[in-house]
Amino acid sequence: MRTMSSSTSEFSGLDCLSTGTMLLDADGRIQYVNPAAETLLGVSGALLLGEGADQVFERSPELLAAIQTARSEQETVVEYELDVTVSGHPPIRLGCSVSPLEKPPQSVLIEMRAVDPHLRIARLEQARLQQEANRELLRNLAHEIKNPLGGIRGAAQLLEHELPRESLREYTQVIIKESDRLQSLMERLLTPHRMPHYGAVNIHEVLERVRSLILAETPSVTLRRDYDISLPEIRADAEQLIQATLNIARNAVQAMHGNGHGRGQGEIIFRTRVARQITLESRRYRLGMRVEIIDNGPGVPEDIREQIFYPLVSGSEGGSGLGLAVAQTLVAQNHGTIDCESQPGHTVFSIFLPLPT
């Protein structure tokens, strides 16, 4: 945790930073604004000093919620993309982090940086193309393997009846059981390709269903909610969204338990927020929904971060590498996309979905 002096002159060194920096005292009043923050917000720091953050950012509920969480939880809150609106000015798309400070108590440091919209659009387009490649690869893999697999299983059953000794049948049982396992794997590969059944879906009912399943499977995991209950229903396939979210949550549990995180230490947060001015499937939406699955596990290994949504790529020992690929395909069928930001101790999978207009 960082420490802040009571005198803003102590922070003259922050004037040279290219990252926008703002300091709030225990009462939520702005005590310091560096030049980079003035440029990003389009407001003179002199007009902001002494003002309350709840008034300056009254139209930026996500930022105010991040400030409140940082204070109450005494941990850094990272918002990779949010709309920040200063009174009387148009909204700006920024990436922000809010860190609690030791001195004075309850003071916080806000760091902000511009989000390049062209970079995000390019990344989303790359993800869309990757999804199409995933679908084709999954379909081809499943069909190429499924048919001969049935022949192998049938031959093993016939062979089992011809073997003279019971002890030899153990080998045919291995073949049959492994064939059944691969058959199940192929069915999972083909499952996302069924046509979705769209209907009115409350995203929080989806998350509560996933929450109950995760807690039943892994009671040692702490699962917290941070919902924006004002979010309206969306038109989507509820079962597909349940499966996609469940795959991501299970992936988080597997990562935490499979990489040295002891029982009782793993924590997952389900968070929902409004997302403004988002691009999905090359289409611009004025309003969307962001569903975040956040965990405190070891993070996605750096060498596979760019490939985590590819089939058969897994960062966990014993993982099939299908969970995230299937999740992305299911979300794409509901006109959404999945993004991931990861560092040790803080991984965020964000599902973006359009809201009805």
Image: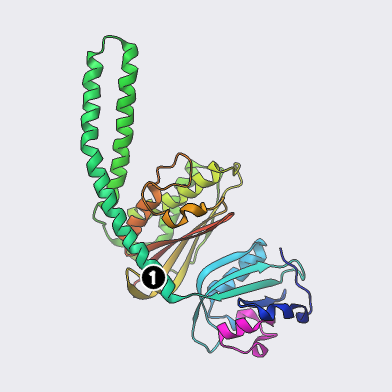
Q: Position of residue 310 (x, y in %)?
A: 37, 52
> Secondary structure under badge 1?
helix
Work out whether 15 lies above or below 310. below
- Is any part of residue 14 visible from this angle? yes
Work out whether 201 lies above or below 170. below
Q: Position of residue 38 (x, y in %)?
A: 61, 85
Residue type for callout 1: Ala
- Is any part of residue 236 visible from this angle? no
Query: Residue furthest toward the top?
Result: 164
Q: Which quarter shows the C terminus?
A: bottom left
Does the segment drawn in magenta span residue 39? yes
55 or 297: which is nearer to us? 297
317 or 281: which is nearer to us? 317
Q: Position of residue 338 (x, y in %)?
A: 41, 61
Q: Is residue 327 left or right of residue 59?
A: left
Q: Which quarter shows the N terminus?
A: bottom right
| Residue 274 quadrant | bottom left
For the point 75% across and 80% down, which residue is it?
8
Q: Which residues are magenta?
A: 32-54
Work out whether 269 lies above or below 27. above
> How are the residues colored?
rainbow
Does the segment drawn in magenta span residue 60? no
Number of marks present in the image shown: 1
Residue pointed to by mark 1:
122
Q: Is residue 172 left or right of residue 318?
A: left
Q: Position of residue 77 (x, y in %)?
A: 60, 65
Q: Residues within 10 Å of mark 1 (few under 14, many from 20)?
A: few
For the point 29% across and 59% down, which residue is it?
132
72 or 342: which is nearer to us? 342
Q: Is residue 181 left or right of residue 216?
A: left
Query: Residue furthest toward the front?
Result: 303
